[in-house]
Amino acid sequence: MDSLHDTLWRAAANRRARLPRTSGLPAADVDAAVGEVLRRALEHVWEHGWMPHDVYEAVRRDADERALSFLVDAVAADTARHTALHPRWRAQVDGIGAEVWWDTGEPHLEQWARRHIELREDAVAAAVAVLGVLISLPGLPVIVPRPGTPMAAFDHRGVDPKVLNRVRGLLAKAESTAFPEEAEALSTKAQELVTRHALERMPVEAATTTSRRLWLDRKYFDGKAQVVHVVARANRCRAVVYDLGFVALVGEELDLEIVELLSASLLVQATRAMVAAGDGARKGDEARSAAYRKSFLLSYAHRVGERLEAANAVPEDDRLLPVLAERRKAVDEYFGAMFTRTVAKTTPVRSAAGWDAGRSAADRANLSVG
């Protein structure tokens, strides 16, 4: 059993290494070895700040669908060992569809292979691919208590469900409409609704400063990350971009939920406007080039940031002024403790036409926060 453990680790650490031959070994022994190495790997990444959705995204970007499926099962098996889970941890487990679907009295490896019409060796290869990604992940700041720790079951108050449903409805309509003016009105209404909700709660509720991670598609990543950054700044949060493919957000729990919602909607609208700007262009035209689209998104983010900053004036309610100051201080202190070394990055704009088109699209996506 020990030699099989070692062989699995070596194969994961060196992708050129030969996969272990398991066809002549008892199914229960192979299953136990695979389960053990994945459990140890998951425990390690949990201890170093990763969460279920994070590892899901990391494997999705670096391995195939078989490996992703095996990871989801490994997370489900690991989750089943714990009774205390933080609500955000539970939400992420549910979000990736991690549930124990197999008969736990029988080897999971064999059941996975049958379900996916694969051989046992294919299942082992998928497990090794998952392990290879997990052991390569760098450490991240711990932002949520991991399963089994004393604070794992700690709950928090987020956006009121009724408000959340209304906001999601407004943003869904904004994303689906073909009319820019209607999208603008719906997005504006959504921002005003969540801002009013946040400001109304500030004087009566204690702040819960924390961090979240928003994973983005790699294509035109810099421009998309900049959109998230300006939305975060407008909603009293701070952001750090990771080359791994996500933006780390720091802020009060309610504000972070707002940033996630509005960023996702703005990115849908920005991407749709970017693609529409190239409609009718022929292959080779600037409007279909990568430089044009990168410049479009950067300009879009820049202009949205300008408009949010202008609209997001401090409210006249004197009760909120000291509260806002305290929240800002708490966010800055939390940010400083999490990120002791950050580096400013500049992204060049290589298409004036793309910049102009992005700015025009941002004007149509007017998001007043006042």
Image (cartoon, rainbow, N blue to C red):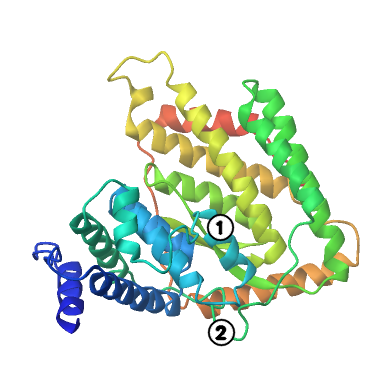
Residue 315, given in percent of the width and then of the height, sits at 85, 56
- Residue found 75% across the figure and 49% down from its top: 164
Give the Cα distance between marks 2 and 1. 20 Å
Identify the residue at horizontal 32%, vertical 19% (top origin): 285
Q: Secondary structure at mark 1?
A: helix
| Residue of label 2 | 149
* x then y, percent, for residue 293: 40, 33
Identify which residue, 161 or 359, lies in the foreground. Answer: 161
What kind of element bears circle 2? loop
Using residue 269 as the reference point, say whether residue 73 is left or right of it.
left
Tell me if residue 303 can be seen. Answer: no
What amino acid does circle 1 point to? Asp
Residue placed most toward the observer, 69 or 133: 69
* Quarter assignment of residue 138: bottom left
Among numbered discs 2 and 1, the one appearing first in the sequence: 1
Q: Position of residue 33 (x, y in %)?
A: 26, 75
* Residue 276 in the figure: left or right of residue 113: right
Location of the N terminus (image quadrant): bottom left
Q: Which residue is mark 1?
A: 94
In the picture, measured across the screen, residue 355 lies left or right of residue 33, that is right
Q: In the picture shown, does residue 217 fall above or below 72?
A: above
**In the image, residue 361 above or below residue 281:** below
Q: Residues within 10 Å of mark 1 (few under 14, many from 20)?
A: some
Q: Residue at x 78, y 53 (%)?
A: 161
Give the camera-side residue of 155 and 4.
4
- Find residue 151 and report its image quarter: bottom right
Number of numbered discs present?
2
Q: Is residue 306 visible?
A: yes
Residue positioned 42% across, 46% down in the render: 217
Amino acid found under the numbered disc labelled 2: Thr
